[in-house]
Image (spheres, coloured by chain):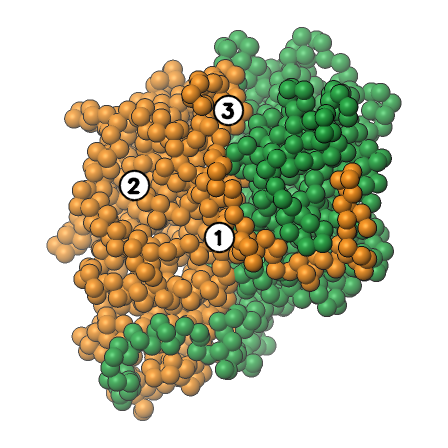
Chain colours: A orange, B green
């Protein structure tokens, strides 16, 4: 049993990655550390370093090296071990929620207690009475009960009203009868349910006195606390392998007339009278929309992280991966002491810049919009507390569309970056394959990315009609740009040379006109031409996207432009903001041209200026991904290695491949030898080099 | 140890999938069997059925059920077993190459002998002398030697001239010295090399008499034929886990001054004199381009299969997956004997049609273009045999761009279809997750999808200059549309109402004008404004894509329109062809508007007509995927189940999940119990339903 080992004396071809990345860093126009501090704050960066140091040397969480090799069975069991260890670390280091979140992000693997923390406990907190909190939440905080959140069913996802599971109240026994009438009523996709949870918040249609009141939340014990066996009346298990996220035990559960005590129904808002079974309606639920805004602001911030991480890997690797010689601009480097023409780093090729730099710019764009959403969330919470609900609708509509747009950008950006790493992007050692797989559910959870846009566009159409009718109340961002459009519906873009497209005002008005025009046309189609909503769905999606692209551009611009913004860090952000606007505009040129605001000649100028904007980013590209500060421990990426050791790490990681633990791999005797020898004698190699019998 | 089992008496909610799919099939406007026969031919369909029957009942190849659950170790070993079994079946049933190809497609898993068949043997066949064929090819055919094709290196992919591995000829010993000077010279990604192969064709830079003649192919024995141990001077192993394709042992190999006999260099074209070491140049290599065209025609045909399979899953599942009630058009169905309003199948929603039907249309588009490419390949071979090389350049340029475009469509279409299956698309049981992962390398191999477009566009620019100068020889498809454009460079699209966009001529001229305009601008930019090629790369990519979209539209139209095309099968293909053209045009509207041929108002008509074209496909959607004839054995997809048993199969497949083989999963004792019990006594459940100590 001799393992496969690479020859230790061999080095990569010169110039090596370390040298190339050092050159890139030396030519940056700004200080990445200063920019990182201004973006994330010194306190957070310091805390992150502290927690990283703890995790890296932890006996359970410090070693992630198994992740790319083992099957789901092994990965899941190690994920359970990690989940337990994380609970211990929280106690040892007295981490608060924010610190645990940092640790989770650095550890970078969703585990079986994820939903216990992110959904089970918050639901008890928000919707439980004091009695229920005492019963369920307190032991949950100590992990003495472990919960999950069971809403989605095998046959029912986004349409909560279509759920089949029922909870029928019987006043005579003061119990609910929890029941799954069909196979499709099986709860499905429930994180933490397959293996770990012994409790669940179950969404079931409440039926009392023969009337169906729709879905309500119930706390249900599902497994025995001594043996962990499913309770009688409960069928529960894991839903099986997924495209990603296989360290979480997404589960299914069916109930066969399971009896629940009256206290099981979470009763802070709606309730059923214990004796009469009479139903009491919930108060105004606008407060819940506030929470959704907060959750979505976090998703937009996470989108920034995802794009940043993908760009980090692809930009670093592209700076050291060389291919062909660009004859018009040959690359020279020091090779064994002599300056020679060498192959050109692929990052110098325009197509590579066109693929990667917009993703880099998107990462920054999402950052500033998430910040603004957080600000608006707190502003809105304060207003609502003071009885002013006028900020809510606009904020909720924008947050829906932004969740959809930014997570869609995530998936596209991640795959683009992975593919832009060429063949090696396909190796798991790139660090982008499993990452892509794990990020995908974001497009579906917290609101399906297509369905969500209906909420955004419905609001925009309503606003447009109000502005048109002069019945709009307080001016909002949306109503203002519609007002501008209605004042001058045949306005034309003033750009006459490429550099006009670096003027933030010119860019912003183009994005504004585009949305207002699309909304105007849609209102006409529905109100005048009587188009059905179904026939409008494609436009509805486009309108939401257009509005949210405008928001991203507007927030980016207002964060980085201004009289006092003159530092090198400000300037590089300004170049990025212009690139973000231009590359978005170029991708959406069909809309902009169709609305007639921009002429074909002006569109050609946009193309030209986009190329110029890419070139302006090139010298700072590596420094701009360094700003994100992703440690190698987090990324587990050979290609994105901070020190440019991409090729060395590819070989180091290949040595860990189980098939390489013996020079003759398992399976040879059984499946290869019989073919080669095929009942004949052994082979001999002749003097001519060919093998013969 | 009691396994988790779903209650056997539960059925899915009504109307069930089987009923819904039957309704869809009943309302089709054409006969799917008739269309399938006309597309694929009766002989092929019959052969496919015969081979399917053999595979389904085969003890080794019949059961694919492990594929979604096990880690790479188990999957690879089973893949080895399958590879051996396939070799046996070929012998037993005397399958020819075409039949083996059908079997491979049905079995649907690349294995360790894949490259032995697709690259090692063909290379020996094409580039070996008779002596070399006798030495290597004959035993290879009997699987007594197993080979691979080692070209790509860790640091070098597309640029073959950059390869570092050298083969230095020494006339005194009449041997080549095969050597890997650096770590990046390691051959990498070589299919079949990691575990299985004992021989390789190695591409290495030939050096003789001190001169470097660039990369040439050498046949190299790499493992001992008795023990399978690597030979001295050889370091060989598996490159580790990949995003997909993990049933293949992609490997690496390094050579430390390995001596090869003179016969090792494949010498049909170039050779080195045994005694003097003098190099003899190869003859004209145009014939090799012919082969590339053939390989790429096959890739376009495979692209059709990929898109067809993705569409099959997503369309079938969307026909039975219901969500919300579309109030404007409520769905009614028989539920327990009564007609009731039920949730609307998602396939009725316009957004779903907009996402799926273009993919369906692309599958057909690729089919007809692949057919035309095959026809042109044979035409060109005949011409070349007669000394006429005038067809080659056009064909080669188009085939490069088409390979890039259709495999790019593949990846996008597959992911679109997977995501359009909602949450369940993320389950591996959708059958689309692993499939996506396994298909991705197509974007990189046989020519990187970005690099390839440079070949296409270079040819188009050259053609344009020739047409402009009047020096173009024989008229080709490309030169003809450029001629038309140059004759009327300011032509305008004549469409004035939505239905004008169903006129094939109107659509075709729009696609033609667009390419010619883009080419014209690019020629100006380079020839007049002295833009560098690097700065033009984004346009270069666009031009190739535009040209190949035109080819797809033109080939589709010419296959399905015509006076004699009046059957129901013809008509549904015509509707699909129009949809393909419209949805492509709509996606590329930025180009079309920028070139000024189409006005903003006409663009609005395109949008409108696209919606109408989608509606026209809706009644035939399920029948159109049935035409592809994908058996459940091939697809392994719960959602795409032919009989609509999507939900039943999701639960059946979940029962096979290893975590479900005991109601209390492995890991509980070690990682969950200690938390729940936390050093305290066991739990009791009180009368109030809550668990307490």
Labels 3 and 2 positioned on one and the same chain? yes
Q: x%, y% of residue B610? A: 57, 40
Label 3 CA crowd tier, 10 Å (few <14, some 14–19, many 20+):
many
User: In this image, A134 relative to B37: left or right?
Assistant: left
Q: Residue furthest right?
A: B386
Q: Residue furthest left?
A: A386
Label 1 CA crowd tier, 10 Å (few <14, some 14–19, many 20+):
many
Q: In the rendered structure, which disc, 3 or 2, sits on the residue that comes first in sequence?
A: 3
Alpha-carbon span between mark 3 and mark 2: 29 Å
Q: In the rendered structure, which disc, 1 or 3, sits on the residue that comes first in sequence?
A: 3
Residue bearing mark 2: A629
Residue bearing mark 1: A656
Q: Chain of mark 1?
A: A
The residue lying toward the viewer, choosing from B19 and B437, is: B437
Q: Nearer the viewer, mark 3 or mark 2?
A: 3
Q: Residue at x 69, y 26 (%)?
A: B170
User: In this image, B99 relative to B337: left or right?
Assistant: right
Label 2 CA crowd tier, 10 Å (few <14, some 14–19, many 20+):
some
Is the residue B117 above or below the residue A317 in the image?
A: below
Q: In the rendered structure, which disc, 1 or 2, sits on the residue that comes first in sequence?
A: 2
């Amino acid at each position: 049993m001799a393992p496969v080992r690479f020859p230790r004396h061999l080095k990569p071809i010169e110039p090596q990655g370390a040298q190339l990345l050092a050159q890139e860093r030396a030519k940056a126009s700004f200080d990445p550390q200063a920019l990182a501090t201004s973006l994330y704050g010194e306190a957070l960066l310091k805390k992150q370093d502290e927690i990283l140091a703890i995790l890296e040397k932890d006996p359970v969480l410090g070693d992630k090296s198994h992740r790319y090799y083992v099957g789901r069975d092994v990965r899941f069991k190690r994920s359970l071990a990690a989940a337990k260890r994380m609970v211990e670390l929280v106690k040892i280091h007295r981490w608060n929620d924010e610190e645990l979140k940092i640790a989770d992000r650095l550890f970078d693997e969703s585990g079986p207690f994820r939903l216990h923390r992110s959904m089970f406990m918050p639901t008890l907190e928000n919707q439980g009475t004091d009695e229920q909190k005492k019963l369920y939440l307190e032991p949950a905080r100590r992990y003495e009960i472990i919960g999950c959140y069971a809403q989605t069913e095998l046959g029912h996802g986004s349409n909560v009203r279509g759920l089949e599971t029922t909870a029928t109240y019987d006043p005579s026994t003061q119990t609910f009868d929890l029941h799954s009438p069909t196979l499709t009523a099986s709860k499905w996709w429930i994180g933490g349910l397959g293996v770990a949870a012994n409790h669940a918040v179950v969404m079931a249609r409440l039926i009392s006195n023969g009337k169906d009141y729709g879905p309500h939340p119930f706390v249900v014990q599902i497994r025995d606390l001594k043996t962990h066996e499913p309770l009688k009346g409960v069928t529960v298990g894991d839903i099986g392998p997924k495209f990603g996220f296989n360290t979480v035990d997404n589960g299914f559960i069916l109930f066969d007339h399971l009896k629940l005590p009256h206290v099981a129904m979470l009763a802070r808002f709606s309730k059923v009278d214990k004796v009469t079974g009479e139903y009491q309606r919930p108060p105004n639920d606008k407060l819940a929309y506030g929470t959704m805004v907060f959750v979505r602001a976090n998703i937009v911030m996470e989108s920034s992280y995802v794009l940043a991480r993908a760009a980090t890997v692809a930009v670093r690797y592209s700076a050291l991966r060389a291919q062909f010689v660009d004859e018009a601009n040959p690359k020279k480097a020091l090779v064994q002491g002599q300056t020679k023409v060498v192959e050109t780093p692929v990052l110098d090729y325009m197509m590579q810049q066109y693929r990667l730099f917009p993703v880099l710019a998107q990462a920054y764009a999402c950052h500033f919009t998430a910040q603004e959403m957080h600000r608006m969330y707190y502003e809105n919470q304060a207003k609502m507390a003071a009885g002013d609900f006028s900020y809510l609708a606009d904020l909720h509509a924008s947050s829906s569309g932004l969740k959809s747009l930014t997570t869609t950008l995530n998936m596209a950006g991640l795959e683009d970056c992975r593919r832009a790493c060429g063949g090696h992007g396909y190796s798991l050692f790139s660090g982008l394959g499993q990452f892509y797989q794990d990020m995908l559910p974001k497009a579906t959870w917290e609101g399906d990315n297509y369905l969500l846009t209906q909420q955004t566009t419905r609001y925009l159409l309503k606003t447009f009609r109000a502005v048109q009718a002069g019945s709009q109340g307080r001016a909002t961002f949306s109503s203002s740009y519609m007002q501008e459009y209605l004042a001058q519906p045949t306005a034309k873009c003033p750009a006459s040379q490429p550099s006009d497209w670096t003027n933030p005002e010119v860019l912003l008005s183009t994005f504004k006109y585009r949305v207002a025009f699309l909304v105007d046309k849609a209102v006409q189609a529905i109100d005048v031409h009587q188009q059905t909503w179904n026939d409008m769905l494609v436009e509805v999606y486009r309108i939401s996207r257009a509005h949210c692209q405008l928001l991203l551009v507007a927030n980016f611009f207002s964060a980085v432009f201004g009289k006092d913004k003159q530092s090198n860090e400000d300037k590089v952000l300004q170049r990025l903001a212009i690139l973000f606007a231009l590359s978005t505009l170029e991708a959406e040129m069909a809309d902009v041209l169709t609305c007639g605001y921009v002429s074909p000649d002006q569109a050609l100028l946009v193309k030209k200026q986009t190329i110029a904007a890419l070139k302006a980013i090139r010298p700072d590209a590596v420094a701009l991904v360094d700003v994100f500060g992703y440690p190698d421990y987090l990324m587990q990426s050979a290609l994105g290695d901070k020190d440019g050791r991409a090729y060395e790490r590819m070989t180091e990681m290949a040595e860990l491949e189980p098939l390489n633990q013996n020079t003759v791999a398992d399976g040879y005797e059984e499946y290869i030898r019989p073919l080669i020898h095929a009942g004949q004698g052994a082979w001999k190699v002749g003097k001519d080099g060919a093998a013969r019998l």
